Amino acid sequence: MPIADPMPVLTTAELATRRERLTESGVHLLIGSVVDMAGVARAKTVPLRRAEVFHTAGMGASPTWNVFCVDNSIAFTERLGVVGDLRLRADLAAARVIGGGWAWAPSEFFDQHGEPSPNCARGRLRSTQARAEAAGLSVRAGHELEFVLTDAEGRELSGRHWQAYGLGSVVREGALLAELDRALEHAGVGVEQLHAEYGTGQFELSLAPAEPVQAADDVVLARLVTGRVARDHGMQVSFSPLPFHEGAGNGAHLHLSLARNGRPLLSGGAGPHGLTDEGAAAIGAIVAGLPATLGVLGGSVLSSARLGPGRWSGAFACWGLENREAAVRLLAGTAGNPHGASIEVKCGDSSANVYLASAVVLGLALDGIARGAELPPEVRVDPAQDPSAVRLPATQEEALDALDASPTARELLGDDIVSALLAVRRHEVDNYGGLGIDVLAERFRFAWTS
């Protein structure tokens, strides 16, 4: 499936207006970033006076940017090597001021002739969002990001006074959290909730729902801002799936809601908990598709260490109302849910490329609606106690083999993206698969921190 509808190009007048507003905001430098197959944000930076060029022609980038690995190695393939060039073009319509004389803009890959690169993750999500709109659907996505604070040297904070979900835990880091909220608001990222989580030094940041591309952009920016604020307070932040081998894992939960002509698909119907036929089909297809696409949502060398029964990580391909051990948790459209009904996909983490993870979940839902996928029976207990619940791949190798064999994944993402992703992740298997979790946790603690 090719990437359709290239990133819109602003007119000369629109570009001039945009640059003038950024200048008035004190911006001197513009960062344009992409997220690679290892889930790492890579970037180019230009003086603001070159913003128009960054948007229209782009900055040069080797095709190997698509196969950079988490350890900064390059997983060369037959199609991605030292020859050739891509253009990294900044989407100035989505640029945000982040303070300190800087602005940030999400970017996309194009070839030298101005055609979208088939390896562009943001372009893939944009095409998937356009497909939903063409089918008469409106989509909202929201993300929850878990992270762990460490000291300046990357050591675990003392658990002596830590209270899981505790008031005291929030108050002790109150100055940092207040500054984080102010910085995110300044950057145009809506914060729904910010609270202490279960693990020592662990917090969860819930972002406001938006259309899928903007919601994914917000994730990239929120992680950038969180890292900056933590460093300003003499700390570091880890988004790793498992920052410390005996600690809590960090998830990256994706919420999704769908509507047709203003009518929600996940409530107001005759199905279980108010599901409509189309809403049920969307959930059924996501549940069925997760085992083959886990390599996209949580395919890193540390992902499987987080994804296990009893960790509230969604280790089973099943669904249930408010079931926190199910990979797909339904939140019904009740008075206690002001945004309306949604589903939460829990098995992903921040080592994933958020654009690809979003494209997979939305793509599965769209395909399910189109073909009327069957909704499996609801799991109303801990899935580990239900023999019918399907365990998601338990190792990185299993997740990647399932992805490699999946025609669905290749249809949703394209052969180029799947092949590049497999090359990058299999580099991790080959070079780090035999190491202990303690070594891996330390080695990659800050690999996904911007």
Image (cartoon, rainbow, N blue to C red):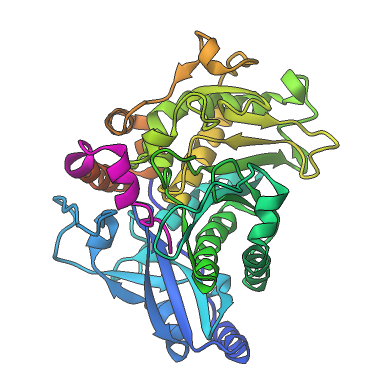
Q: Which residues are magenta?
A: 429-450
| Residue 23 higher or lower than 137, as above or below | below
- Of 103 and 170, nearer the camera is 170
| Residue 245 higher or lower than 444, as above or below | above
Quadrant occupied by the N terminus: top left
Count of numbered marks: 0
Judge left or right: residue 272 versus residue 23: right
The quadrant holding residue 264 is top right
| Residue 370 higher or lower than 114, as above or below | above
The quadrant holding residue 254 is top right
- Of 56 and 202, nearer the camera is 202
Residue 214 seen by the camera = yes
Q: Name the spot of residue 97 as percent of width and height, x first.
A: 58, 78
Q: Name the spot of residue 306 as percent of width and height, x first.
A: 43, 36
Q: Residue at 49% of width from left, 35% of height from top?
A: 347
Quadrant occupied by the C terminus: bottom left
Q: Name the spot of residue 275 as percent of width and height, x first.
A: 72, 25
| Residue 439 higher or lower than 119, as above or below | above
